[in-house]
Amino acid sequence: METDTIVAISTPIGEGAISIVRLSGPEAIKIADSLFTGKSLYDVASHTIHYGKIVDTETNEIADEVMVSVMRAPKTFTREDVVEINCHGGLVAVNRILELTLANGARLADPGEFTKRAFLNGRIDLSQAEAVMDLIRAKTDKAMNVALGQMDGRLSRLIQKYRQELLETIAHVEVNIDYPEYDDVEEMSHELMREKTKEVHDHIEELLRVAKQGKILREGLSTAIIGRPNVGKSSLLNALVQENKAIVTDVPGTTRDVIEEYVNVRGVPLKLVDTAGIRETEDLVEKIGVERSRKVLQEADLILFVLNYNEPLTEDDKQLFEAITGLQYIVIINKTDLKQQLDLDEVNMLAEGRTLITTSLIEDKGIEELETAIANTFFAGEIESGDMTYVSNARHIQLLKQAKQALEDATTSLEMGMPLDIVQIDVTRTWEFLGEIVGDTASDALIDQLFSQFCLGK
């Protein structure tokens, strides 16, 4: 257990009704009590809240009226004594209280240090700790539910179960090698080893099968809106976001830069990027925007390609079709309230079977159909839920892929008739990869790096 007491502001900085200064460590109650006028915090019951004032003991000035929560170890988030000082929101009051706690013996917490202490003190494992940050960053209900499931230990329990199965297999091989005279121990054969490793391999494959959905729910779909100038890209962004984030005019080249906005589409977070219209231009500023648009295009998970129903296809349109060949895209034919000039047969031929959606953004038509098409493209219309365990973290996905590969290497060795003690090396590697997910075999450097990404006060 850590010997020092840490403190941080755990609420967003700025004006608000309430701000919270959180302390954790062996001196948390002592430091808070030295500043608090009201009941003695030493005498109050754990998990209770008390009214009083925070007073600067040197000047005897009142810093703020507060409510102080006292939570004694081990039944706290960090498994240490925790005190939360609920004060009035605003920069002055909360910073003054923070400064007083620091002056009385607390240390300013590092980013993520409260959660790191929860991990180091055994309350949560590494995958649960990472889920705390996923919960904070969740942009849709479904993303939040995935994070809550992981915080609850759903993924951890599965990983620990698979590790235990592998550990028993490894131990079985060791017993056969070290104690061949034990007749009551079943001999580990190549066939039995193949059966044990295949079972875990199939479980890992199932986790990876839904990993793409989980990663999308966690990070969102990077979605680029492209098309020639003045086809309705910014109008589409505004319609999806339901705010006037982008400037909408009839003047080509109005969007000079990349505009980003998150939007919830059928429970899926889309990171929408409204790009500058891609065309040949002599305008230096617009040219920079066009180059950025081309870069965004290559990095997008999904492309919304907007065409004008009121104009025939141009060479620029055809070049855009070429630019997105092989990428995931939906064609949106906008301005259907105007007279048709676009050859839909030609568009269908160039789109090579991709989904076509017709819209009239000025009349608010077609957005529902577009949202359904996006959900169908990535989730076949439905996101699996219920008891489904999602892997959404890129680090976890990579480790699962490495574990799967190690088991496949073990299977190859078995098929080649290699001795079981050699095959066991790959099985042990699998056990270690899975251990990195929950933190059992993670290095100190990795742990420090992961928690450094957390916000201060969490």
Image: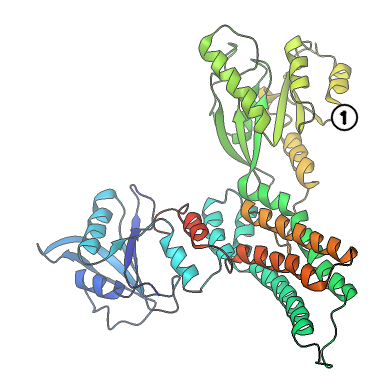
Badge 1 crowding class, 10 Å Cα cut-off, few under 14, some 14 to 19, many 20 or more, is few
Q: Residue at x 29, y 74 (%)?
A: 27
Looking at the rendering, which quadrant does residue 326 occupy? top right
- Residue 334: horizontal and vertical position, in percent? 73, 21
**Vertical comparison of 272 with 335: above or below:** below
Name the outermost residue toward the left. 59
Looking at the rendering, which quadrant does residue 346 occupy? top right
- Residue 442: horizontal and vertical position, in percent? 56, 63
Q: Residue at x 80, y 60 (%)?
A: 409
- Residue 358: horizontal and vertical position, in percent? 78, 26
Looking at the rendering, which quadrant does residue 319 occupy? top right
Q: Residue at x 34, y 59 (%)?
A: 8
Q: Residue at x 63, y 17 (%)?
A: 277
**Residue where numbered disc 1 is placed:** 353
Residue 14 is left or right of residue 160, and the answer is left
Please name whichever residue, 19 or 21, is drawn nearer the observer in this view of the structure: 21
